[in-house]
Image (tube, rainbow, N blue to C red):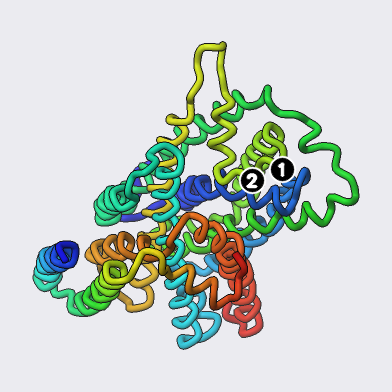
Amino acid sequence: MSEFVLLVLVMGVMSVIDIRAMNRNGLKKEMIVYLVFLGVAGLLGILSLSTPRTSSIIKFLLERFYVEW
Amino acid sequence: MLQGKNQITIRQTIILFFISIFSPAIRILPNIGSRLGREAVWVGPIISSLALYMIFTVLGQFFKNNKIGNIGDIFDHSMGKFFGVVTRFIYLFWIFILFLLYVRYYAERLVSSIFKNTDIQFFILVMMIVVFIAIRGRLEVFTRFGEISFFIFTAITIMFLLFLLPTVKIENIYPLTDRHIVPAIKSAYPVLGLWGYITFFMFLGDHIKDKNLITNYRRKYTIFLTFMTVLLLVILVGSLGYRIAIRMSLPFFGANKMISFAESFDRFESVLLSAWVITDFVIISSFAIIIMHTIKGIFKLTCVKHLSFPIALAGYYGSLKLAGSRFEIEVFSRDIALMINIILGFVVPVIVFGIGKLRKKI
């Protein structure tokens, strides 16, 4: 739970700093792209914190490609 | 030499490429190469040099037109806007996977070699903070760091290889007969898988001042990279033997434990590990910068330094979720990643070149 709080806190603080800087420089398109990729990073964070360490992206891919290991 | 604002030279780009592939080369080539090439593993780079020379020529043809900024623009120019953007997205996805893979490899190596029973989260966090600072800064500063570390790392590697020279047994790598032809060709697979990264570095093309001169240097760069790779394989496989190299996950690290100089200096592996971490930092940061510039090209952005935070954050959590163990990433590298690297690094640029020629766009 504390890791989730830390993730939200870090994302919140850094995004406020970056978005304010982008807003100041009139970088509207950059702001949208930034938020999309921040969302992707956040999703990876939630995925990493909420699922067991034994399940992984590579394991999923190896099973889909029928790689014996 | 000082360059213009955020401009680097093709020489600096190639140096970044050289130092970036050194970390995976000393891990993958002796191991996977020996599995495929046995005693003839050291012939693999010589065969691969033909493909490297060819790709340098193709890239030179791409950048002959001064209006072309980076390799993504070539995709648009040759195949049309739609297929160009789709191809850029495929590259973006794959370079992101490689970025996560190298973050994980770096942490796993530290945990498996020196810092046993330490949580990898700590090493990943430290690396991501340093990468975040590096990629937020100016590109030319990072490339200058790459240049300095390239000379240091080359000197350290040559020193280690010289120390290992007395342990080389010629029967481990020679004689080669006609039954080694197929293994020698097979051993080119991991070499090509790594050398294909040169195409990925061309996404930085907008910032490379003299990229059209790549053709002039192709012979020099190909000979240097081939010579260094052959030397590495001859000495490593020559001293360990291919059977042992197959079974070791870190053959270069294992071979360095054999070094003893003047019967008083030994245990040099900590020096190697420090140099190795620097090259890991270079490859991870390089891929992060390439990701940022690929995004810039796709969405036509003017400034990308703010993307450093989402990328570093994704690098931290993504690398943790990428694999459950070192074994998984090794299998993934061997069976999937090297193959995709060859396709995206060599095959796709050649196809794009062919399409461009047919459509009279190049």
At 22% from the left edge and 79% from the top edge, which residue is drawn? A32
User: Tag 1, which chain?
Assistant: B
Task: Please state which amino acid type lies under the numbered disc 2.
Answer: Arg
At 50% from the left edge and 85% from the top edge, which residue is drawn? B83
Q: Quadrant of residue A28?
A: bottom left
Pointer 1: residues within 10 angstroms few (<14), some, or many (20+)?
some
Q: Is residue B122 above or below residue B330?
A: above
Q: Quadrant of the N terminus of chain B?
A: top left
Cβ–Cβ under 8 Å for marks 2 and 1: yes
Q: Name the residue nearer the viewer: B222 or B237.
A: B237
Disc on res. B243:
1
Residue A60 image offset from top left, x and y in percent: 48, 74
Label 2 to label 1: alpha-carbon separation: 7 Å
Q: Which residue is mark 2?
A: B247
Q: Is residue B90 visible?
A: yes
Task: Please state which amino acid type lies under the numbered disc 1.
Answer: Arg
Q: Name the residue nearer the viewer: B152 or B300.
A: B152
Q: Is residue B78 above or below residue B264?
A: below
Q: Quadrant of the C terminus of chain B?
A: bottom right
- Element under label 1? helix
User: In the visual, does B296 lie left or right of B236?
Assistant: left
Residue B202 image offset from top left, x and y in percent: 48, 62
User: In the visual, does A17 lie left or right of B279?
Assistant: left
- Element under label 2? helix
Q: Is residue B146 above or below residue B358?
A: above
Disc on res. B360:
none
User: Tag 2, which chain?
Assistant: B
